[in-house]
Amino acid sequence: MEEQGITTSEVSRNVQEAAAGTQEVSSNIAGVTQASQEAGAASGQVTSAAGELSYQAEMLKAEVGKFLERVRAA
């Protein structure tokens, strides 16, 4: 009977340890999910900034072209 009590206690302890491990894994997954979402948002911001920079570069190119035409005409 005493062995059965010890075995039951050991099983209970193992179940508690497994539950704690599962909780830790779940917490880590939540952290990875949040980091992934933040990286996605940052990627979107970089893409947007790159698009704006490309637009500004095209505008600058056009203005420089106009300026050079005026210089040549002068």
Image: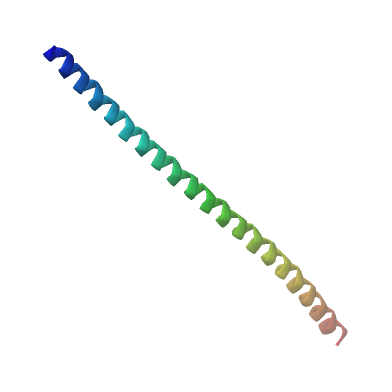
51 with respect to 70 (left or right): left
Residue at the limit of the structure toward the left, as seen here: 2
Residue lying at the far bottom of the rendered structure: 74
Q: How many dots with numbers?
A: 0
Measured as percent of width and height from the top left, residue 7 is found at 19, 17
Vertical order, 51 against 63 (above or below): above
Q: Is residue 70 above or below residue 29?
A: below
Q: Answer with left or right where residue 29 lies relative to residue 57.
A: left
Q: Where is residue 51 drawn, in percent x and y? A: 69, 62
Instruction: Give the quadrant of residue 58.
Output: bottom right
Depicted 38 relative to depicted 25: above or below: below
Q: Residue at x 84, y 83 (%)?
A: 70
- Front position in the image: 60 or 27: 27
Q: Is residue 63 left or right of residue 22?
A: right
Q: Quadrant of the N terminus?
A: top left
Measured as percent of width and height from the top left, residue 14 is found at: 26, 25
Locate residue 33, reporting x and y percent.
Answer: 49, 45
In the displayed structure image, the side of residue 19 where residue 65 appears, left or right: right
Query: Residue furthest toward the right?
Result: 73
Q: Is residue 31 above or below residue 12?
A: below
In this view of the protein, which residue sits in the foreground, 67 or 17? 17
Figure coloring? rainbow
Q: Residue at x 68, y 66 (%)?
A: 52
Residue shown at the point (73%, 73%) measured from the top left = 60
Decide which of 27, 56 is in the foreground and name it.
27
**Going 85% across and 88% down the picture, which residue do you hit?**
74
